[in-house]
């Protein structure tokens, strides 16, 4: 007969999160993966304590367990999202029976599906961008030629009507608006053009500082913190510089004068999250750009990366769409967190060695 200690070690060392509850609602077992996925710190009184109290920061899990005790059939491969952390959880529930086939508790097995969800969304985004790109490129090419003709003809008329101030003013407005429309078309073409990255090994900290030096204004408002263990990336220096410039420019423009932009660069080692489903996580670098601005409403937050969506009076709405496109091309992920009055944080996660076949070494 194997000792009870063996079975306890078996549960505690599983690669899935495991949570066992007794019939009277007390925590019988909870492994380190479970704590990590749920975002809870282990406490000395957790084992033997009421699960509703131990899991009070995860009300979604509490509701699942409460309903499971009364259910005749239990969920198999169901999913839920933790509101507090935003993580997607895949779970299975099993009832525990004793030798007399009396129900004595429940076991919840679960995995963090957030990375799987992010990868799937990234692939869906690539498909959407390809379709949108074909359509937008065709439209932009058709619009660009007439705009160029309008601008040329208006310029010709302006030279011929120098003695008519009213006509000169009207033609000047036509030329100005034509140039603006043409600039938008050029930006659309830039957005839909496939990215062919020219990559090399680079120090992401140097790229961040280069981006700050290239800011038109507000460079003194940016504070940078770079962890000492951040490795070099295989990436396109020019594209990353533009990406960081765009994020920092948006952050500066969102704030009142004197506001601070905090840029944090950190290293996520390989296999740092074994609780995640799918392939083991490779080493990654995260770059977070956080401002002290007014924040973004929940409705706008859902559309912030959509092409042509903007809250700026003269914006084209393509800046953040291009940023996300560059991140996806590097096999990375971009996330945003914000709330009115609490500022906005953009977090870019890039693999140290991207797997995309589109990357071309110089």
Image (spheres, rainbow, N blue to C red):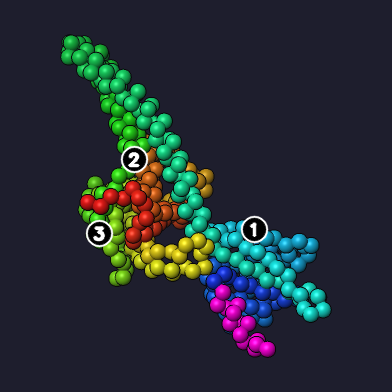
Q: Position of residue 61 (x, y in %)?
A: 64, 64
The residue under label 1 is: 78
Return the x and y of residue 275 as percentages of the image width and height: 52, 68
| Residue 141 within the segment the image draws in magenta | no
Q: Residue 272, which numbered label?
A: none
Q: How far apart in space, not on screen, are marks 1 and 2 (Cα)?
A: 37 Å
Q: Is residue 215 above or below residue 139?
A: below
Q: Is residue 296 visible?
A: no
Image point 55% across, 77% down: which residue? 13
Q: Are marks 3 and 2 in contact (CB under 8 Å)?
A: no
Q: Which residue is mark 3?
A: 201
- Return the residue nearer the eye: 73 or 302: 73
Position of residue 50 in the picture relative to residue 149 (left or right): right
How far, Cα to Cα, is label 3 from label 1?
42 Å
State the residue at coordinates (37%, 63%): 284
Tell me, for residue 194, which label it has, or none: 2
Magenta: main secondary structure equals: helix
Q: Is residue 336 left or right of residue 228?
A: right
Who is closer to the viewer here, 278 or 71? 278
Q: Which residues are magenta?
A: 1-14
């Amino acid at each position: 007969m194997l000792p009870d200690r063996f079975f306890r070690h078996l549960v505690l060392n599983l690669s899935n999160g495991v949570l066992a509850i007794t019939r009277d609602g007390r925590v019988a077992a909870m492994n380190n993966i479970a704590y990590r996925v749920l975002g809870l710190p282990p406490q000395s009184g957790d084992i033997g304590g009421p699960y509703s109290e131990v899991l009070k920061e995860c009300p979604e899990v509490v509701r699942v367990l409460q309903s499971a005790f009364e259910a005749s059939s239990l969920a198999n491969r169901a999913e839920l999202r933790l509101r507090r952390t935003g993580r997607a959880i895949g779970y299975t529930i099993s009832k525990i029976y004793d030798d007399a086939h009396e129900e004595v508790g429940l076991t919840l097995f679960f995995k963090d599906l957030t990375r799987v969800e992010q990868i799937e969304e990234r692939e869906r985004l690539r498909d959407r961008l390809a379709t949108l790109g074909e359509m937008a490129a065709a439209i932009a090419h058709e619009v660009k030629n007439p705009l160029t003709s309008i601008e040329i003809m208006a310029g010709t008329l302006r030279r011929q009507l120098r003695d008519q101030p009213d006509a000169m003013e009207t033609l000047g407005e036509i030329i100005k608006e034509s140039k603006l429309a043409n600039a938008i078309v050029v930006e659309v073409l830039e957005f839909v053009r496939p990215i062919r990255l020219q990559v090399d090994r680079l120090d992401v900290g140097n790229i961040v500082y280069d981006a700050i030096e290239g800011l038109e204004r507000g460079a003194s408002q940016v504070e940078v913190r770079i962890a000492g263990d951040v490795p070099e990336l295989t990436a396109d220096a020019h594209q990353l510089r533009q990406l960081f410039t765009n994020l920092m420019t948006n952050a500066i423009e969102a704030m009142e004068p004197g506001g601070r932009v905090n840029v944090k660069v950190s290293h996520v080692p390989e296999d740092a999250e074994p609780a995640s489903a799918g392939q083991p996580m490779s080493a990654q670098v995260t770059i977070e750009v956080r401002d002290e601005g007014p924040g973004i409403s929940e409705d706008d937050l859902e559309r912030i990366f959509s092409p042509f969506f903007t809250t700026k009076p003269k914006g084209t709405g393509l800046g953040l769409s291009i940023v996300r496109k560059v991140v996806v091309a590097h096999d990375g992920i971009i996330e945003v967190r914000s709330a009115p009055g609490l500022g906005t944080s953009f977090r870019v996660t890039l693999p140290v060695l991207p797997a995309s076949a589109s990357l071309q070494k110089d």
